[in-house]
Image: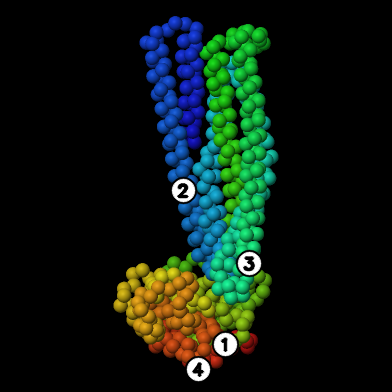
Amino acid sequence: MLAGILVGVAVIGQAMLLAWIVHRAVTGAPSIADLLPAALALVAVVLTRGAAQYVQGRAASTAATDRCRAIRDDLLDRLHAAGPARLDGWHRADLASRALHAVDALTPYIAHYLPQRILALVVPALIGVTALLHDWLAGLLLLLSAPLIPLFMALVGWGAARLSARFETRRARAAAVFADHVRGLLSIRLFNAEREATVRVRGFAEQLRDDAMRVLRVAFLSSAVLEFFAAVAVAAVAIYVGMGLLGYLAFGPADDLTVYRGLCVLLLAPEFFVPLRQLATHYHDRAAALGAAEQLAPLFALPAMPDATDAHARDPGNVILQAIRVARDDRTILQAFSLDVRPGELVLLWGPSGCGKTTVLHTIAGHLPVDAGEVRVNGEAPGIPGAVAWLGQRPFLAHGSIARNIALGRDDADRAAIAEAARNCGVLSFAEALPDGLDTRLGERGLGLSGGQAQRVALARAWLSQAPVVLLDEPTTGLDADAAAPVLAAMRRLCADGRSLVVAGHDPALRGIADTVIDMAEPS
């Protein structure tokens, strides 16, 4: 803003010097020596204006980049603090779109609109006062026309903010639809539904295009309003100066109008509207930012888990739940539920779907708070980083090698530790038959591995993590007896290594290896 104000001051100095040089050249017969100091001063002012504009743009870009980076970091921290349980209702592509596009939509708002909002008040005021001092009538024409422009821009901006919010919502929804189609491409091909899928994606794209054009139409309308009033005001000043210099006006200060004063006012008149014109140019950035803020607000409003910063486990492998109560969406899922898991013990949470098995795992992991009771994991409050390892029904496998997926989250793991984890969890039994062994690259979501092989890779990751407590959600779902056997054997080896396993499932094979079976269908 300071650099922008300096630009405004330089504009005033430039107009006054140029008007003085022309006035001297027209009304007298000056020598080059008489005009040289003013000309050098004019060059210095022009260079100062250019340098100030460069500093203004550079500072705005840096500030916006830093602020948006901080906003995105805060957003990711909020998502991490909320935990996966609270994000179950959000589509991953929707979250990615909001974290990327919605935050990026704030960049021009921070870089241009916020400082320009102040400059649109300060710089025209400086120019208007200067014009008023040179000719009070011309200055009055400029100052009276200025308030009309923000008024009509605000009226247009209300509609632009509403359209921008709808555009951001539509873009997030289109991203989710496209991601779903890419993820389900195999099923789409198998059911010969390519045409229907293409039509649906194209329909969302067309709706997104229409919304974008509506936003642009409103943005251009605000610029047209500004240009109209600016053109009328500049034309009025030009007519007044021209008629006054020709002697056709005898009103007010027209009789005393000189070439210097008239030309100075005439040069300042279009510059008076430049900050307002730039504000109009960036006014749609405000509308886009308001729409993006509506998309980001629900994510920042997600409740966070209580802080748990003590990373020193006092009782490794011990899990205690004492009469806990958990409710979600005004529905009680667990009531007076207790659990006691000792180091090296495999506890099976048995029961049909919907009885709260996964909720217990989320509670132990620190993803869900309890409404009553107490939870202690490794002798501490839940949520301490590295206290638990998680293996869901569909383990996450990234695009990359098998070894990289085993070492996910452990950048410091050496090759020997990765190989040992792979051996203990049965990964080497199939990896050694592959051309590149543990360096065999997997497709996205573990493409190239069977369900049982993917589970063993995830178990190897849990082994490598050295977490005292391992949580498994339906680890054998969808696996036949032959595929499940290595997974069950790896689970027993984890227990033999001193880890505590809490397993949610209803596979009879799990009952055969469990030390304790808790029937979740029975009342506590």
Q: Secondary structure at mark 1?
A: loop
**Residue that carries the numbered disc 2 in the rendered image:** 65
- Asked whether the residues under the numbered discs 2 and 1 touch, taking CB atoms below 8 Å apart as contact, a structural biologist would say no
Q: Secondary structure at mark 3?
A: helix
The answer to whether 38 is drawn above or below residue 104 in the figure is above
**Residue that carries the numbered disc 4 in the rendered image:** 512
Residue found at the far bottom of this picture = 512
Looking at the rendered image, the disc whose residue lies closer to the viewer, 4 or 3, is: 3
Calculate the distance from the C-alpha at mark 2 to the C-alpha at mark 1.
51 Å
Q: Which mark is residue 195?
A: 3
Q: Secondary structure at mark 4?
A: helix
Return the disc, 4 or 1, that comes first in the chain's sequence: 1
Return the disc, 2 or 1, that comes first in the chain's sequence: 2
Q: Is residue 467 visible?
A: no
**Residue that carries the numbered disc 1 in the rendered image:** 506
What residue do we see at 43% from left, 24% from top? 45
